[in-house]
Amino acid sequence: MNFVNYTYDFHIHTALSPCAEEEMTPNNIVNMAVLNGLDLIAVTDHNSAKNLPAVFACAQTKPLVLIPGIEVESAEEVHISCLFPQVESALEMGQLVERHLLPMKNNKEVLGSQYLFDAEDNIIGEEERMLLFSTDLPVEEVFAAARSLGGCAWFSHVDRDSYSVLPILGALPAGLATGVVEATDSPYGREFVSSRKDLKNKEVLYSSDCHRLKDMSRGTNVISLSEERNQLTAETVINWIKEKDMR
Ligand SMILES: [Zn+2]
Ligand SMILES: [Zn+2]
């Protein structure tokens, strides 16, 4: 079987995330990804999927595959990247997450605005609910919800000191299939991963967690898939991740 290397960045925020820069519009993200030589990107805003339809429309016009995602914050304040084969299933996950978020209003003067875009980068509204907050869903329930909607989930930025599974829970939870984890695309992220015995058998995906364009990965991280370039879809990638998760 022939394998093809695909470059990726599976952790990118739009300006719907209050901590992201206003330059993180659908077209800017997609164009920067193409400039950086990325084949695959996942857009994962905090606790919301609402900008995915616009990003998907932009990505469709480029040699780029968008994996629709959400970065969910669990009840324990652990960040979990949830990725889906279609925008619709990500939106469904977004609705579930919304039902489990405290109904607090965003304070945009303090935290930043939460912009909703159309595919031409027009601001079509602002999310009123504060997205930078934990849900009341325990880690296990976040994974279960993503998987029941046909998606996959992994712990985000495991090398970080905050909002990260290892400092908060002390270890990867036993009994949860976590064949894949994410570390930040940085020398520290790599060093951290090689220092941890419990990550030895994991498939580690290095992503930028970028909140501004200049931090997006530069196309140096790859996954190898048997799929031909013209056949590549988000679903192919999700299936590859699911296989790794079962190990
Ligand atoms: Zn995070
Ligand atoms: Zn993030």
Image (tube, rainbow, N blue to C red):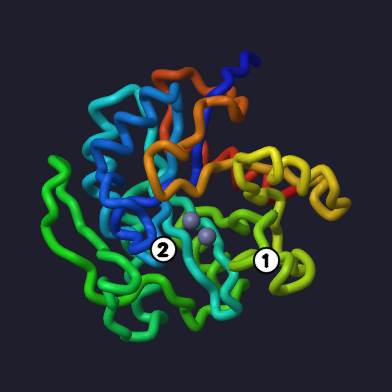
Q: Which residue is mark 1?
A: 165
Residue 194 image position (x, y, % from top left):
82, 43
Nearest the viewer among 84 and 122 is: 122
Instruction: Point out the tag, 2 or 1, that comes first from the N-terminus.
Output: 2
Do the numbered discs 2 and 1 sit on residues whose CB atoms are within 8 Å? Answer: no
Label 2 CB less than 8 angstroms from ligand 2 = yes
Q: Is the residue 174 above or below the residue 40 in the image? A: below
Q: Is the residue 113 above or below the residue 86 in the image? A: below
Residue 220 image position (x, y, % from top left):
58, 25
Q: Residues within 10 Å of mark 1 (few under 14, many from 20)?
A: many
Nearest the viewer among 145 and 17 is: 17
Q: Which residue is mark 2?
A: 46
Identify the residue shown where x is 65% and y is 58%: 160
Give the quarter of the image for residue 166: bottom right
Q: Secondary structure at mark 1?
A: helix
Measured in 3D between alpha carbons, the distance from the residue under mark 2 to the one under mark 1, in whole angstroms, is 16 Å
